[in-house]
Each structure stands twice: as C-alpha cells, then as structure tokens.
Image (cartoon, rainbow, N blue to C red):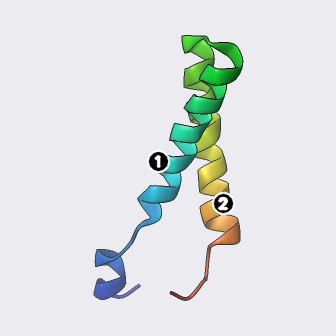
C-alpha cells in the first residue's frame, strides 16, 4: 500500500457501522443490555467479514 492509500483509508467505517447496527438490532429485538454487547461483537465480526471478503481488492 502506498502512503496516499494509507491516508485515505476508510476501513474503520465498516467496523463502526457493523457494530452500531449490531447493537441497534439486538436492542430492538431483545431490549437487553447484555444482548446489545453481543450484538455489537457480532456486528463487528460481520463488518470485518464484509470488508475482507466482499470489498477487498476493489478499485476506488
């Protein structure tokens, strides 16, 4: 990766969105704080899978 690509990396957006919507989904379905944490972890993992499986190698 070049220096220019490192400065414009928005990979963190996928992780944050996955975690946010995982928490939101868990809270809406269960209404429990414990499941909100679990939903955030699962959302983070799904965001990582999406980033490394689907988006990896795409040209901007």
State how far apart marks 2 and 1 are (Cα): 12 Å
Percent x, y for residue 22? 61, 36
Identify the residue under disc 2.
50
Tell me if label 2 and label 1 are in contact, CB under 8 Å: no
Percent x, y for residue 26? 65, 25
Looking at the rendered image, the quarter that the N terminus falls into is: bottom left
Residue at 63% over, 72% down:
55
- Crowding at mark 2 (Cα within 10 Å: few <14, some 14-19, many 20+): some
Identify the residue under disc 1.
16
Percent x, y for residue 25? 65, 31
Local secondary structure at mark 2: helix
Label at residue 1: none
Local secondary structure at mark 1: helix
Image mark count: 2
Q: Determine whether 8 is above or below 41 in the image.
A: below
- Crowding at mark 1 (Cα within 10 Å: few <14, some 14-19, many 20+): some
Residue at 30% over, 86% down:
4
Percent x, y for residue 12? 43, 57
Q: Determine whether 56 is above or below 20 in the image.
A: below
Which quadrant of the structure image shows residue 2? bottom left
Mark earlier in primary sequence (2, 1): 1
Which quadrant of the structure image shows residue 30? top right
Residue at 46% over, 47% down:
16
């Amino acid at each position: 990766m070049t220096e220019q690509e490192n400065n414009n990396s928005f990979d963190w957006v996928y992780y944050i969105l996955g975690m946010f919507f995982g928490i939101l989904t868990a809270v809406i379905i269960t209404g429990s704080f414990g499941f909100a944490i679990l939903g955030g972890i699962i959302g983070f993992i799904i965001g990582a899978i999406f980033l490394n499986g689907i988006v990896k190698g795409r040209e901007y």
